[in-house]
C-alpha cells in the first residue's frame, strides 16, 4: 500500500487545485473512496464505499436496480473498531456455501485501525449480510498485525477446494517493506495463519492491491501493483495465475507487466472483472505509454482480454477521470461490474469535485470481441459521412437510410467506430456542447472512444456527451454534434448489425456450407435430426434450403432437405430439429449473414456476439474467448467463415 493512504481519514477535505472532475453521474453527495461493487443474479448492483461521517469511518452500502437508475443507500457497516481508522474495504458474494454461510451471502472486509497511534495493531475485519446489504453482523477478524506494520487492501474469493480465501497487503513481515499474503478459511470464522504469496525480489518492493478473478479456462488470475520499485514502472500492474486459487508460485518472482500490444501499461490500484462470455476486464488508476508518459486515454480506458489474460487491448470506460494521477482520490481503485449477459459494464470511480472526494458512476455496452459492421439508425435517418467519406474531416451527418458504404459503420474491439477506413471523431478532442462530428484517421485516442448505451445513444466518455441531432432535426445533411446526454429521441441512433444477404443465400436456394479453414476445406456441415457434424462430401444431408428467418425475415433460416427440420442451436451446439413453433425455436433457428474473408459468417439472431463455428468436427455458436472450449480464439475467424455453394 502506498503511504498516501495513511491520510485516508481526511479524504473528505482533499482538494486539488486545477483538477478536472470526472465525467459521470454522482452516486450521492457523500465523501467516498475505494468503491467496490458486485452484480446479483437478478441484475441489481450492490456497491460499497469507504466513507467518513462525523462519528467515524463506515462502509456505505448502496443498491442500483438497473444500469440507468442510479444508486440508493440501503445499509451501513459500522465497525466500532473503525473509529481508529478504516481503509480500503472490499465486497464479495459467496457463489456457493462455505461452512455455515449460505450461497448468496454478502461479505464485506476492511483494513481497520491505521490511526491507532504508535501502539496500533491493525486488523482485517470480516462482516456478513444475508439481506443484500441491509443489515450486517461481525463474522471474524481475519488477521491482526503483530506490530506497527499495517494490513491493507483485502480481496475475497473462493478457491478450487471451496474455501474462502483472503488476500491482503502486509507491512508487518520482518525484513520486508510490504508483501502480499493469503489466509484461508473453511467456514469464514476461523482463519489460517498468513502465507506470503508475492514478496518481490527486493526487500523494498511493495506488492499490494490484489485483485483476483476466475478465468474461463478454470485458472485464477491475480493482478496487483508493485510500488517501491522506482523508475517509470513504480506501482505498475503485474499478474500471475494459479491452477487452484491458492498455489501462486515463487513469491519472489517478478511477474511481467500487463501491457497492451502497443506497449501501454497500467499503474496503481488495479481491479478485475470477468464477463459471462469469458472476457477479462482490468482497470487501474492510470494508463501509461510505453515510455512512461501518461497515455492520451489516461483515466478513460480499461484493458480487456479475450484470451484469458494472454494479451490485452485498451478500450473506453463508462466513467472518464481526465485528471487521474498518483494521489489518493482521482480514479483511485475504480471498479467494473459486467452485466449478467456480459454485453455491458457499469463502472464506479472517484474523483475530486472541489468539495472533496466523491464516487461517480456510469454504464455502457462493451465493444464486440471481433469487429462487427452495421448502421446507426434513428427512424428512417442514419448516421452518414458526407462527400463519400474519402478524406479526414469529412462531416458526420444524418441522411435517409440507404445502406450505402458511407452508412456502414464497424464497431471495433478498442471502442472506436470506423466508416470508409476512418473513425468517428470529435475534432481536437473537444468537450463542448455543439461540437460537430467528423471522421479522421483511426488513432485510438479519447476523441475516438465511444460507448453504446442501452437507450440507443452513443456516448463519448472523454466529453461525457452524446452524439446528437441538433434540435431533433434528422433531415438529409444535418450535421451531427456532441450534446449533453438526455435519453431523448434526437440521441437514439440504435446500432443494427449488418445483414448482407449475399446472393448465395437467396431465399429458396438449396445450399451447402463448406469450411474455409486450411486443412478442412473438403468438409461440409452435415445433419439429420440431432447434432451437426463437419465431414467430407457435399451430398445427402449436407443440403439445406434457405428460408426467410423464422424470427427475423431480414435474416435466414436453413431447412434440411433430407428431414425438413431446421438448423438451430441448443446449449450453443448446432443441430437439426423439427420446428415446435415456439418463439425460442424460431430465434434459435435464425441466423444473420455477414460477408467475411473467404465466405460468409452466420451470426446468431438471439446471441448476437456468437457466430456459427466448427470445432472438433462439430458446430457451435461461439464467441472468441468465451467460457467453453469451442470459444477458443485460435483460428476463430477462419472457422467461422463458410463457403456457400
Image (cartoon, rainbow, N blue to C red):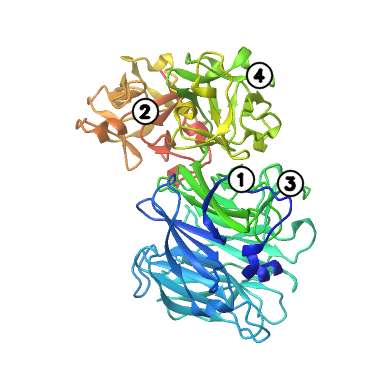
For the residues labelled 1 and 4, the Cα–Cα distance comes to: 27 Å
Nearest to viewer (mark 2 / mark 3): 3
Q: Residue at x 35, y 72 (%)?
A: 101
Residue 320: numbered disc: 1
Name the element at disc 3.
loop
Question: Disc 2 or disc 4, which is closer to the eye?
Answer: 4
Closer to us: 248 or 153:
153
Q: Describe the element under mark 1 as helix, strand or loop.
A: loop
Per the image, label 4 sits on a secondary structure element best described as loop
| Mark-to-mark CA distance, 3 and 1 | 18 Å
Question: Position of 211 compared to 45: left or right?
Answer: right
| Precedes in sequence: disc 1 or disc 4 | 1
- At a point 50% along the width and 79% down the height, the residue shown is 80
On the image, numbered disc 2 is attached to which residue? Answer: 591
Which percent across, then down, holds residue 349? 57, 53
In terms of secondary structure, where does tag 2 sit? Answer: strand
Quarter of the image for the C terminus: give it: top left
Image disc number at residue 289: 3
Q: On the rendered structure, is 57 left or right of 46?
A: right
* Contact? badges 3 and 1 (CB < 8 Å): no
> What is the CA distance from the residue labelled 3 to the residue labelled 4?
29 Å
- Up the image or down, 139 lies above or below 16; here it is below
Confirm or deny contact between disc 2 and disc 1 (CB under 8 A): no
* Dot 2 or dot 4, earlier in sequence: 4
Tell me: residue 603, above or below residue 402: below
Would you name the residue on which mark 4 appears? 394
In the depicted view, which residue is nearer to us: 356 or 163? 356
Amino acid at each position: 500500500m502506498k503511504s498516501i493512504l495513511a491520510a485516508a481519514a481526511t479524504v473528505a477535505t482533499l482538494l486539488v487545485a486545477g483538477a478536472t472532475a470526472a465525467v459521470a453521474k454522482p452516486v450521492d453527495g457523500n465523501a467516498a473512496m475505494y468503491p467496490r461493487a458486485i452484480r446479483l443474479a437478478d441484475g441489481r448492483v450492490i456497491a460499497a464505499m469507504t466513507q467518513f461521517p462525523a462519528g467515524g469511518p463506515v462502509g456505505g452500502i448502496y443498491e442500483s436496480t438497473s444500469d440507468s437508475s442510479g444508486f440508493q443507500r440501503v445499509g451501513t457497516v459500522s465497525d466500532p473498531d473503525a473509529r481508529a481508522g478504516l481503509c480500503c474495504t472490499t465486497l464479495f458474494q459467496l457463489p456457493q456455501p462455505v461452512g455455515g454461510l449460505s450461497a448468496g451471502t454478502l461479505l464485506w472486509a476492511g483494513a481497520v485501525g491505521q490511526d491507532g497511534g504508535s501502539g496500533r495493531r491493525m486488523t482485517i475485519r470480516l462482516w456478513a449480510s444475508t439481506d443484500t446489504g441491509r443489515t450486517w453482523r461481525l463474522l471474524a477478524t481475519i488477521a491482526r498485525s503483530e506490530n506497527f506494520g499495517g494490513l491493507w487492501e483485502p480481496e475475497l474469493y473462493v478457491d478450487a477446494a471451496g474455501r474462502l480465501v483472503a488476500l491482503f497487503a502486509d507491512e508487518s513481515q520482518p525484513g520486508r517493506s510490504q508483501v502480499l499474503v493469503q489466509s484461508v478459511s473453511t467456514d469464514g470464522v476461523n482463519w489460517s495463519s498468513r502465507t506470503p504469496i508475492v514478496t518481490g525480489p527486493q526487500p523494498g518492493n511493495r506488492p499490494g492491491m490484489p485483485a483476483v478473478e476466475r478465468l474461463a479456462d478454470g485458472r485464477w488470475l491475480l493482478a496487483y501493483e508493485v510500488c517501491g520499485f522506482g523508475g517509470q514502472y513504480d506501482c505498475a500492474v503485474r499478474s500471475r495465475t494459479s491452477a487452484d486459487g491458492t498455489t501462486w508460485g515463487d513469491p519472489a518472482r517478478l511477474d511481467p507487466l500487463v501491457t497492451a500490444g502497443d506497449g501501454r501499461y497500467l499503474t496503481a490500484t488495479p481491479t478485475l472483472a470477468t464477463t459471462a462470455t469469458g472476457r477479462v476486464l482490468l482497470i487501474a488508476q492510470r494508463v501509461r505509454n510505453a515510455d512512461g508518459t501518461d497515455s492520451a486515454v489516461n483515466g478513460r480506458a480499461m484493458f480487456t482480454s479475450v484470451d484469458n489474460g494472454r494479451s490485452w487491448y485498451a478500450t473506453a470506460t463508462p466513467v472518464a477521470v481526465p485528471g487521474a494521477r498518483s494521489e489518493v482520490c482521482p480514479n483511485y481503485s475504480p471498479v467494473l461490474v459486467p452485466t449478467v449477459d456480459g454485453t455491458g459494464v457499469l463502472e464506479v470511480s472517484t474523483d475530486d469535485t472541489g468539495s472533496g472526494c466523491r464516487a461517480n458512476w456510469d454504464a455502457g455496452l462493451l465493444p464486440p470481441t471481433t469487429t462487427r459492421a452495421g448502421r446507426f439508425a434513428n427512424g428512417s435517418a442514419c448516421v452518414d459521412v458526407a462527400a463519400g467519406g474519402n478524406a479526414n474531416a469529412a462531416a458526420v451527418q444524418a441522411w435517409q437510410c440507404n445502406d450505402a458504404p458511407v452508412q456502414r459503420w464497424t464497431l471495433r474491439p478498442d471502442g472506436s467506430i470506423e466508416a470508409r477506413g476512418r473513425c468517428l471523431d470529435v475534432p481536437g478532442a473537444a468537450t463542448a456542447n455543439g461540437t460537430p462530428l467528423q471522421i479522421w484517421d483511426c488513432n485510438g485516442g479519447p476523441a475516438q472512444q465511444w460507448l453504446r448505451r442501452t437507450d440507443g445513444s452513443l456516448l463519448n466518455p472523454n466529453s461525457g456527451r452524446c452524439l446528437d441531432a441538433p434540435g431533433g432535426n434528422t433531415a438529409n445533411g444535418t450535421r451531427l454534434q456532441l450534446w449533453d446526454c438526455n435519453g431523448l429521441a434526437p440521441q437514439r441512433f440504435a446500432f443494427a448489425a449488418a445483414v448482407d444477404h449475399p446472393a448465395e443465400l437467396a431465399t429458396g436456394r438449396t445450399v451447402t456450407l463448406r469450411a474455409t479453414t486450411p486443412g478442412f476445406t473438403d468438409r461440409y456441415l452435415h445433419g439429420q435430426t440431432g447434432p451437426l457434424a463437419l465431414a467430407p462430401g457435399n451430398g445427402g444431408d449436407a443440403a439445406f434450403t434457405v428460408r426467410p428467418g423464422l424470427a427475423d425475415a431480414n435474416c435466414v433460416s436453413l431447412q434440411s432437405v433430407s428431414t425438413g427440420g431446421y438448423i438451430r442451436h441448443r446449449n450453443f451446439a448446432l443441430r437439426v430439429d423439427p420446428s415446435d413453433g415456439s418463439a425460442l425455436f424460431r430465434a434459435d433457428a435464425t441466423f444473420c449473414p455477414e460477408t467475411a474473408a473467404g465466405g460468409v459468417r452466420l451470426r446468431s439472431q438471439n446471441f448476437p456476439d456468437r457466430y456459427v463455428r466448427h470445432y472438433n468436427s462439430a458446430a457451435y455458436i461461439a464467441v472468441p474467448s468465451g467460457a467453453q472450449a469451442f470459444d477458443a480464439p485460435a483460428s476463430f475467424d477462419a472457422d467461422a467463415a463458410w463457403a456457400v455453394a
